[in-house]
Amino acid sequence: MTVELILCETCRPSGPPGAEGEPRPGALLAEKVREAFAADPELSAVRLSTIRCLMSCKRACAVHVRGPGRMGYVLGDLPADESSVETLTAYLRAYLRTGDGQVPFREWPSGVRGRFVARIPPLPQPLPQPLPPPSSL
């Protein structure tokens, strides 16, 4: 089963914007994670992608971890540095070992504690049928 890590490439901490043309912290974090994935064959089961905005601007830098049939998580307040890369790769290894995406608290790397923004339940398989349109009276 494939797991996906989606990184917000436009994230930046609150405050004044960086200099014109300077990469945003979200893009810097995405690049650091890309480099770590390239050097770690254990993470080959994780698809890495970026998105222009995860709409978690008050909790930048933000990422979304998800997989089919697994609980998904949005994490925020990640600094664009090596500590976040180590935290994310450790969390992803634990996430990969689960069948449902729920990593036991005792297995959380310390860097994820306090950084969860949202927990997103998996889509049911198969998808439920839509409700019929309301009938007119």
Image: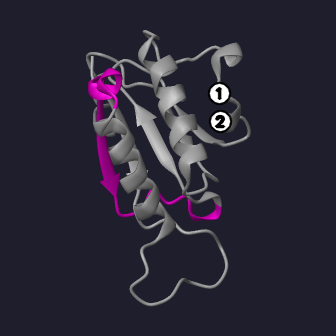
* Rendered image quadrant of residue 130: top left
Determine the residue positioned at 40% across, 31% down: 66
Disc 1 marks which residue? 109
In the image, residue 5 lies at what x, y percent? 38, 39
Compared to 111, does 76 lie above or below? below
Determine the residue positioned at 62% across, 68% down: 13
Determine the residue positioned at 71% across, 31% down: 110
Determine the residue positioned at 29% across, 24% down: 41
Name the kind of residue labelled 2 in the image. Answer: Val
Compared to 92, does 32 lie above or below? below
Name the kind of residue labelled 1 in the image. Answer: Pro
In the image, residue 37 lies at what x, y percent? 34, 37
Q: Secondary structure at mark 1?
A: loop
> Which quadrant, please, contains the N terminus?
top left
Q: CA distance from mark 1 to mark 2?
A: 6 Å
- In magenta, the rendered stretch is 40-58
The answer to if 50 sits in the magenta stretch is yes
Disc 2 marks which residue? 112
> Which quadrant, please, contains the C terminus?
top left
- Residue sitting at the far bottom: 20
